[in-house]
Amino acid sequence: MTMEHERFETVSQCIREAAQQAAAPGGLSALLIKRFLRTGEETWDGAGSGRFTLAGFKENEAYTRASKTALRNLFGLLAELLPAEAQATPQVGPEIIRRRIEPMVRGLVQDDWQEVALRELTARTFVLNFQGARAAMDRELATSFMGTARQIFWALYSDYGLKPEEIDMDCDGVCAGEFAHVTLSAYESKDPYSDVIVHEAAHLLHYLKPRHYRLHTRRGQERFVDVEFRHRELFAFACEAYSRVVLHGGRKLRFAFAEKMHDGAFSFPRSQVEEVAALVLGAAHARIGWRVIREATVIHRIRRRGPKP
């Protein structure tokens, strides 16, 4: 038996053990909980029948609680397989996250919203090293949704070679609305145009609503940045790359750096890099580059004319 095969046998045993521990107190099916851990499916016995009964709701609540417990159990079991230094490395601090996202917020968000946006994006963004993933899972498991917590879990252990092949987890970050999560491997990327912290925080800008923080909004303003749905990935990729461009002093240096993005940005999807690079180059050429990105991606509402006198 190879060391890799032996490692994945250990992981599979941990999955079975975590599911059994969570299922036993309520007399639930460990197989259904194990299936959730592996696939993310939240279909318990009787799901999909179309019958909504009190017993069915109670059963769903019981399986949800048990599945959350199983995730926590499995987190602890697999942690024993990590190097000690990985467990001891502190969480990426808020000062680092704020420094990364501040140019984007200052460039895209209206003045009287900026401090609130910075505070919220900083507090809601996590880098998924061991300590960061544990904190992120606690935040996500406090909500009624488990899917993102499971994604965080496997994103962490994938970076340490502990994710079974059949589990689909191929992304640099996760942003489901309330929080943004960045894999450790993406955070450590050597791509000079990449900053996945900025990318995922950019998604929070078009999810979070200023009125939830008692900020004054005008008619038609919904989010911190009202991005067209079809442009959301373009917006996030452009913010990510342009945040690296602005680190270069002077417009000539910025333009020269942006000009090389098409060939030099190796971590961006090849299907999108041409469009992103063109937008970033246009932003680098402009006096206020963030405005170019904003104008290319936001919802342009039609202004109604007032009644004729």
Image: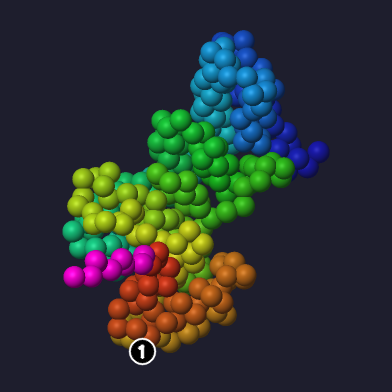
Q: Amino acid at mark 1?
A: Lys
Identify the residue at image location x=66%, y=36%.
39
Identify which residue is drawn at 76% across, 40% down.
5
Among all residues in the image, which is located at the extreme right? Answer: 1
Q: Which residues are magenta?
A: 301-309
> In this view of the protein, which residue sits in the foreground, 187 or 210?
210
In this view, 260 is above or below 183: below
In the displayed structure image, the side of residue 302 where residue 263 appears, left or right:
right
From the viewer's perspective, is residue 165 above or below residue 197? above
Foreground of the two, 31 or 129: 31
Q: Where residue 106 appears, x then y in whole percent? A: 26, 65
Q: Position of residue 88 (x, y in %)?
A: 43, 41
Residue 304 seen by the camera: yes
Estimate the x, y position of residue 163 in percent, counting from the top left.
64, 42
Image quadrant where one finds the C terminus:
bottom left
* Residue 96: quarter of image: bottom left
Give the residue pinned by disc 1.
252
Residue drawn at point x = 61 percent, y = 30 percent? 42
Majority secondary structure in the magenta region: loop
Q: Is residue 73 magenta?
A: no
231 and 97: which one is in front?
Answer: 231
**246 left or right of 57 in image:** left
